[in-house]
Image (spheres, helix red, strand yellow):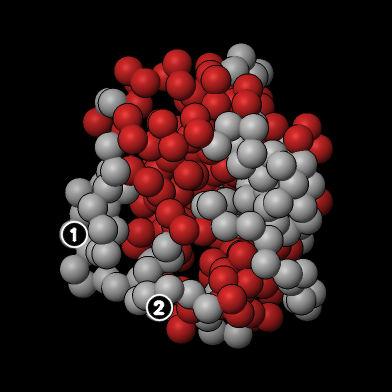
Amino acid sequence: MPLGFIQTFWGELVLSSFSAKPVSLLPSVLGLHSVVDMVVATLDIRDPYTSEHSHRVAGLAELLAEAMALSPEQCRLVHYAAHLHDIGKIGVSDSTLNKIGKLTAEEMAEMQAHSEIGAMILSKNPEFTLLAEIVRHHHERWDGKGYPDGISGDAIPLESRIIGLADAFDAMTSDRPYRAHKTHEWALEEIKKHAGSQFCPECVSIFLTLRAKLKLNQYQSSKRAFSHHQANVRHHTLMHSQRIRSMPTRH
């Protein structure tokens, strides 16, 4: 599906959610959570793993945000942004998104562009400015070696740092067609090892205190069978990846 069509369609949908006038056949006011649900449903049709992954990341990220004593409004913002953090994968080609095996440098660069594409889609509505910024930066690294902008430390929005950590944890603890999930303890040790390089040290410190809550069933890997669906997003590789090169600007 052409990227321009995708951006236009979702841009109009996002814009309509806070519009005072009807847009085409859409209601004059479309609730934020309804927009999120429709976006996630679209992702589910194309890639069931990405949709389920986003649901789990939203729960994990909100749990961490609450533990960090963020305000209720910030926690809701984190929840919504986490649901939408991979929306930009709608603009990644099927050949790259569905590839079985290691991605080439060019394919990895295309995959990394999903954070920019997602932010571009959300930025169509001025009301979604904060959501767009959070989604754009959820793959930045504390040491500045992330993408798309290579910002570091406190320059990365706190909400993005929270989602990035939750994203990595779920990627490691989820079953994929090419490997079984890692244990929670293994994933926590991996996150601890990368505190101060990939992850925000404060986020890691608080996340490690949530061990007991992370063992609850709602945060376990999805048991859904993936034998019928061969999409290989390689989240566990992508989560540790560093910025390959500047991404081309998309229009």
**SS label for mark 1:** loop
Which quadrant is the C terminus positioned in? bottom right
**SS label for mark 2:** loop
| Residue 13 versus residue 162 in the image, above or below | below
Q: Is residue 76 left or right of residue 188?
A: right
Q: Nearer the viewer, residue 104 or 136?
A: 104
Q: Is residue 250 left or right of residue 71?
A: right
Q: Is residue 160 left or right of residue 108?
A: right
Q: For the residue carrying disc 2, how many other residues have a C-alpha within 10 Å: few (<14), some (14-19), or many (20+)?
A: some
Q: Position of residue 69 (x, y in %)?
A: 61, 14
Label disc, if present, on residue 99 of the rendered structure: 2
Q: Position of residue 185 (x, y in %)?
A: 32, 30
Image quarter for residue 179? bottom left
| Residue 77 versus residue 110 in the image, above or below | above
How many angstroms separate mark 1 from mark 2 (CA)?
18 Å
Q: For the residue carrying disc 1, how many other residues have a C-alpha within 10 Å: few (<14), some (14-19), or many (20+)?
A: few
Residue annotated with mark 1: 225
Image quarter for residue 164? top right
Q: Is residue 116 left or right of residue 46?
A: right
Q: Nearer the viewer, residue 157 or 241?
A: 241
Give the residue at x 49% y 30%.
192
Instruction: Tell me which amino acid carries mark 1.
Output: Ala
Which quadrant is the N terminus positioned in? bottom right
Instruction: Tell me which amino acid carries mark 2.
Output: Lys
Mark 1 vs mark 2: in front: 2
Q: Is residue 119 visible?
A: no
Q: Position of residue 11 (x, y in %)?
A: 69, 65
